[in-house]
Image (cartoon, rainbow, N blue to C red):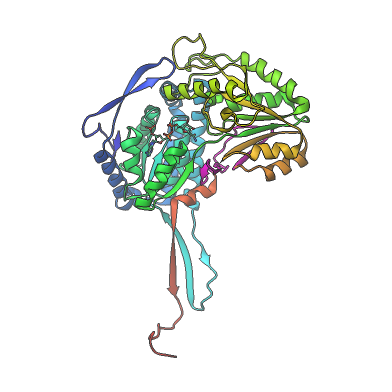
Amino acid sequence: MLIDGEWVSATDNCWFDSYEPGTGEVWARVAAATEVDVDRAVRAADRAMHSGPWSKMTASERGEALGRLGELVGRHATVLAEAETRDTGKLIRETAGSVAYVPAFYRYYGGLADKIQGHTLPSDKPGIEIFTYREPIGVVAAIVPWNSPQMLLAVKLAPALAAGNAVVIKPSEHGSVPILELGKLVEQAGIPPGVVNIVTGHGHPVGHELTKHPLVRRVAFTGGPETARTIVRNSAENFASLSLELGGKSPQIVFPDADLDSAVNGIIGGIFGASGQSCVAGSRLYAQREIYDDLIERLVDRTKSIRLGSPLDPDSEMGPLATTEQLQRFDSFVSATPAEGGRVLVGGQRPTKPSEGWFVEPTILETHAEGIRAQSDEIFGPVLAVTTFDNEAEAIKKANASQYGLAAGVWTSAADRAHRLIRSLSAGIVWVNTYRATSPVAPFGGLRDSGGGRESGADAVYDYTSVKTAWINSSNQAVSDPFKVQ
Ligand code: NDP
């Protein structure tokens, strides 16, 4: 682990095994931090923020350090992508692509570091000037899941450092190795010891102790709703501000005027990319009745031809699931569907090839009936639930009938309809004739059970600051005795 600039093992020298989902075998041993380690990391971060060289660096210097970190990530992209693929089972073609894009996030927030400004306010009191500073908020706890460790860390770490904070990162136990690899680059980037700390281990005790630590001022979390509830409760201990990015059950809506070839590609990529283990997976499909049969036939054909294979093989099109819990989750949803009134159109099984590793088939379920769980609940796997609609109003109603509200996809060639749908869909992100695109410039986050707060985009950097208001009496008037009536 990385604590206060030193590579250390846990104080009680405990370790846990990390499995390679592509083989189902142990491939790394990772330190299991204790409560004492978490406390040391948080205190190191607090010191680094308030008295170390980081606190004396100008915003421009911090921005330059972030730029260098991005450059180093780019230079070490192969190692970082391979570590992510082996630890999480995500395809090398996907991790190589996402890691190659990560430097853009460090550059973007590096560029913003010296543009974080307060305001001079239009004072309503003659002779009194009022203005605001934006100061670093304090120690940030970054809780990172396994499904895209480098990217989901960058959207937290980059704005936190740009604003002058220090960070304690808790990676998932299923995705620690790539984050530890990134830790090796931090010092080379000229970021002083203690500014970035990494504590590895299980949600309990590591994440739990970290999120309720009294010196933690902000928690940036990506993961599941149950963990998020615990974190919200923990925030009652330290009143840390929170960003919660929790996943969804995002609808894709296809109208008859859409370019169906393009829609098929967007739908397939949207649900089977990352083996469906993506918070924005487009896992509900609504197709207008006139084109339903045609679209489903194309989707089923393409799904049958998806090449499952080792995540390290650049020719593989879909890899394994990341954990054995994910396998059980897939099985339980798919096997329940026929009894609930649905039908398996393709997939639904564990494949015979590859014979090792945690693979499942890409799956499409027809879910016309009400109350099918695969239609309403997030599976976090390669399972698409499909059904029809008859008109635009019905499409909107069905798409919005969810406790989640992260993303939505619309496929249409009509500009007026695109605008209506963007306004009517209850989601944090709406993609029209594209899907799953992300960018450092674009806010990302959801509504309701998909969480709150936004990552990425210029405004996110302000979430890592607190406002200080300054009042100056610049008149020549002394303050009068408060108890003497004028
Ligand atoms: P979790 O919410 O358990 O894990 C996310 C992160 O939180 C991990 O780093 C985890 O560590 C950590 N964590 C676990 N418990 C605590 C705690 N008490 N306090 C602080 N941190 C904690 O997600 P899972 O991996 O179990 O996945 C469950 C479901 O969550 C998925 O099926 C999916 O629905 C959703 N999910 C959504 C993601 C997204 O991108 N929005 C990403 C991952 C999951 P550790 O892994 O070591 O337990």
Q: Is 8 displayed left or right of 259 in the figure? A: left
Quadrant of the frame with the C terminus: bottom left
The residue sitting at 49% across, 34% down in the picture is 102
Q: Residue furthest front?
A: 339
In reply to whether residue 191 is colored magenta, the answer given is no
In percent of width and height, residue 445 lies at: 54, 42
In reply to whether residue 441 is colored magenta, the answer given is yes
Q: Is residue 161 visible?
A: no
Quarter of image, res 415: top right
Q: Is 207 displayed left or right of 422 in the figure? A: left
In percent of width and height, residue 390 lies at: 76, 33
Quarter of image, res 200: top left
In percent of width and height, residue 85 lies at: 45, 22
- Placement of 236 over or under 456, stated as above or below: below
Pick whichever, 174 or 472, lies toward us: 174
- The quarter of the picture showing ligand 1: top left
Predominant SS of the magenta segment = loop
User: What range is drawn magenta here?
Assistant: 428-456
- Placement of 235 over or under 198, stated as above or below: below
In percent of width and height, residue 356 lies at: 44, 11
The residue sitting at 24% across, 29% down in the picture is 14
Quarter of image, res 219: top left
